[in-house]
Image (cartoon, helix red, strand yellow):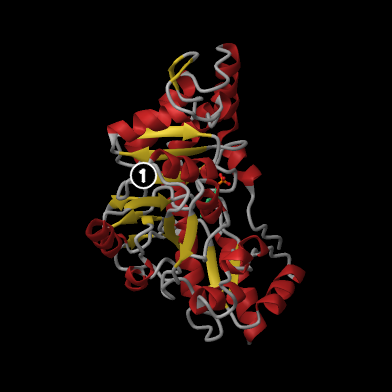
Amino acid sequence: MNVPFLDLKAQYKTIKDEIHAAINDVIENTAFAGGPFVAKFEQEFAKFCNCKHAIGVGNGTDALWMSLVALGIGAGDEVITTPNTFIATAEAISLAGATPVFVDVEEKTHNVNPSLIEAAITKKTKAIIPVHLFGQMADMEPILTISNKYGLYVVEDACQAHGAEYKGKKAGSMGTTGCFSFYPGKNLGAYGEGGAVVTNDDALASKMKMFRDHGQAKKYYHDIIGWNARLDGIQGAILNVKLKYLPAWNDARRKHAQDYTTGLSAVKDVIVPREADYARHVYHIYAIRVQDRDKLMAYLGEKGISCGIHYPVPVHLQTAYSFLRKGEGSFPVAEKCASQYISLPMFAELTNEQVAYVVEQIKGYYA
Ligand SMILES: *Cc1c(COP(=O)(O)O)cnc(C)c1O
């Protein structure tokens, strides 16, 4: 049996007619950059996240970077985040001109360990970026207690967590801003690049709307130095079609995750992901941890099962960040996880047979 890691075509087939009609609409209306289709999606996505505003941008990295710039964070400032993330979280901090300060993660959630944050705060610290890795939110209550105590902004990296919840609160709605990516493989993916920032702060929302469109509120009158970080019209229309299916797609991911977990719990060599008591996990990634990752991955490959690794090298050990001089041993939990992760096939359209087959093959490998 063949089990791809991700099958975007399977999803496309279920919504093909609607997608083509939506694209056609944008072309007929020549609403290519920003415009009414983006505005409509922004309205719907804000509602979905339980936030007042959503601002469509070019991608998730833009969303993170623009949040920091709009909050006035730049040269000389420090921003706390984790090394157990995709590089973009740290890049956004660096490109804003600030310095990333890493804090290790909790083993049970793979997200920032709140009890280690205070020790990393200095006079230069301006913000914390909790990353809701794999679709499970970071432990936001203690993070917000600390941010309130020290007067820090909280920018949620919700790029993997569309629709995830913390005690019933939506990802993106608890921080100063929440940042989303609509990269094609994300739980809500465009047919190209896309991203959004959500916030409840009116002034910040206006500023970010100007910023993403060259600092103008009125065409050719530029009040601030901005950038071109607009969401394109075709992506806005496509995302609007797909958003209404997201809850059902997330439910399907949760069902597959539950089946994986039930099937693999008895395998003592496999550590399965856990859903925290506070969380509704949306399983962007279903990552197990094993000692002999490369061998297992090769074995599954031979059986027709494609897996991924998210991510093989934590950010502090990437060459690009060697200047921070945080060598091996700096963040032991993140380093251990990176050496053990293996991401199993995960997308809404997986069949029960495919999930059962993956479980069976992993059990077979360890038997
Ligand atoms: C995907 C992702 C991003 C970046 O989003 P892009 O749309 O690819 O720029 C940032 N952070 C995390 C955790 C991501 O998974």
Placement of the C terminus among the 4 image quadrants: bottom right
Observer-nearest residue: 72 or 242? 72
Residue for point 52% across, 40% down: 62
Residue type highlighted by circle 1: Thr
Left or right, 310 with respect to 248, comes to: right
Residue for point 59% across, 23% down: 23
Near mark 1 (Cα within 10 A), the count class, few <14, some 14-19 or many ≥20, is: many
Q: Which residue is mark 1?
A: 177
Observer-nearest residue: 296 or 141? 141
Ligand 1 neighbours mark 1 (CB distance < 8 Å): no
Q: From the viewer's perspective, is residue 233 above or below residue 143? A: above
Q: Check disc 1 and report its element: helix, strand or loop.
A: strand
Tell me, yes or no, if residue 283 can be seen here. Answer: no
Q: From the viewer's perspective, is residue 25 above or below residue 275? A: above
Indicate the position of residue 111 as horizontal and vertical percent values. 43, 66
Tell me, yes or no, if residue 67 can be seen here. Answer: yes
Q: From the viewer's perspective, is residue 197 above or below residue 272? A: above
Indicate the position of residue 240 as horizontal and vertical percent values. 47, 31
All told, the count of numbered labels is: 1
Indicate the position of residue 262 as horizontal and vertical percent values. 46, 73
Query: Which quadrant of the structure image shows residue 318?
Result: bottom right
Q: From the viewer's perspective, is residue 266 above or below residue 77? A: below
Residue for point 32% across, 73% down: 115
Residue for point 28% across, 58% down: 147
